[in-house]
Image (cartoon, grey):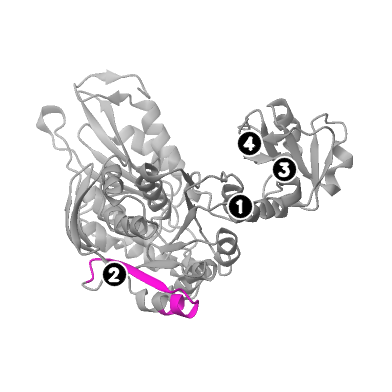
Amino acid sequence: MSWLWTTEDLIAAISGRFVGSLPAGITGISIDSRSIKPGEAFFAIKGDRVDGHDYANVAMANGAAFIVISEARLPAMGSLTVPKVVVDDVLAALARLGVAARQRTQAKIIAVTGSVGKTTTKEMLRRALSPSGKVHASVASFNNHWGVPLTLARMPEDTDFGVFEIGMNHPEEIRPLVKMVRPDVAIITTIAPAHLGNFSSIGEIAAAKAEIFDGVVPGGHAILNHDNDQFEMLEQAATVAGIEHIHSFGQHAKADVRLAEFNASEENSTLWLTIGGETLEVAIGAPGRHIAENALAVLGAVMIVEADLDQAVAALADLQPEKGRGQRHKRAIGNGYFTLIDESYNANPASMRAAVALLATTLPNAGIGGRTGRRIAVLGDMLEMGDYAQQVHANLAGPLLAAGIEHVWLAGLEMAALRDELPESVHVEYRETTEELSEFALNSVAPGDVLMVKSSLGMGFGKIVAGLLDKFPAFSDTGTRTHQGL
């Protein structure tokens, strides 16, 4: 049996004591009692909303090899027959296991942060490095105080490349996480006004992102966006942190990985870049200039960790946008179809502009009787903007007008500022709540339309996407309806 961890090594790493007859090892680690698989260890983490200890019985029923619980909760859980490992604090124990996982591996480790594009960049790295070895990467957006140690703890000892996403909402959140990860390469995709309500300026956001440099191993590398206004500040911060090798990417003439040319289409893109003294043509299976720009950082990292660059380039051709991050759907309606671009996962001013630009490149289709479809921006509030909220929402009018978007459907109290800023030439529909806008969208979409749906996650615009996907069946290129999900 190939164990992720032997029980002996795990208990030693987390400073735990066992109760019951423990197995020789475990095949995985879970903090979700619903999805745990037989043979995995369940760590009963106490979160902001739920306490994993309350679901230990579910984990046991689903086949947990053992459960990791806190000493304080042991008396209340004595009746559970599943073996137990008892620790002082479960999240702290998981962090200790993550540190041990990093210490035992010889993998090249890459950490990614930035205001926009972290998860997509992480997925591009996963894909680009896979032809060159065994890759372990964060699941979804596991980039916080429990997601990072969980991803580390799940990393097999024989991993060749580890890819970690590190996020933050406040200062001093990245530093403790990156000191666990200890990357060989740190990437900052860009600095933009995300979570602006928690900071006094863009400079403070850049300083918080620069915390990633504090965990880079001696002799390690930093990869920075040369086109970003905060480049010089980040370059200086990396130098002060003792990083020996600082690289840049972007369209800037001095960028080490330079974007020479970019061609966009509706569903993919092609770029030409100069890297290592040669020019490469790179086809990417997802649209958007922002994705192409982050591909420069990805290929720079591929070179640094000495993976196969040609195979990495070939792998990016099959990249597909993920749910909530540009995933596209064609749905049958009437005698035609509409196109849905799902950007509902999250939003800040920079990602909003990128999504609007993506909408502008997508051509509406001919509807019934030759009617031309509409490009429709379906937008919800950008949260955590603080005192800047009214300004940043109103400022979206410029990108929308520049992109030629004539139909805008809005929801959320903050989006009232954008409603008031748009001229009468733009057809605006405004609702206060997501539910109201969802009902309107389901009844107002028409053949030929292109809808791009985007908001901060807390607005729940995923409900609008789900509603459209549930109501309208998938559309095949042959013009026939297909069963949903096929």
* Residue shown at 45% from the left, 38% from the top: 463
Helix, strand or loop under label 3: loop
Q: Which residue is mark 3?
A: 44
Q: Measuring 33% from the left and 58% from the top, which residue is drawn there?
A: 303
In the image: residue 28, left or right of residue 459: right
How far across and down, in percent of the image, does residue 185 sit?
44, 62
Q: Quadrant of the N terminus?
A: top right
Residue with the mark numbered 2: 227
How far apart are the two marked residues, 1 and 2, measured between alpha carbons? 37 Å
Q: What quarter of the picture does the C terminus occupy?
A: top left
Vertical side of 26 occupied by 186: above or below: below
Residue 104: which numbered mark, if any?
1
How far, Cα to Cα, is label 1 from label 3? 24 Å
Q: Which mark is residue 3?
A: 4
User: What number of labels is visible?
Assistant: 4
Query: Under tag 1, what secondary structure?
Result: helix
Q: For residue 330, which quarter of the picture?
A: top left
Q: Secondary structure at mark 2?
A: loop
Examine the structure image and report whether residue 425 is included in the region drawn in magenta. no
Residue type, numbered disc 2: Asp
Q: CA distance from mark 4 to mark 1?
A: 14 Å
- Say whether disc 4 or disc 1 marks the residue closer to the N-terminus: 4
Observer-nearest of 420 and 318: 318
First to last magenta residue range: 236-252
Distance from Cα at disc 2 to Cα at disc 4: 45 Å
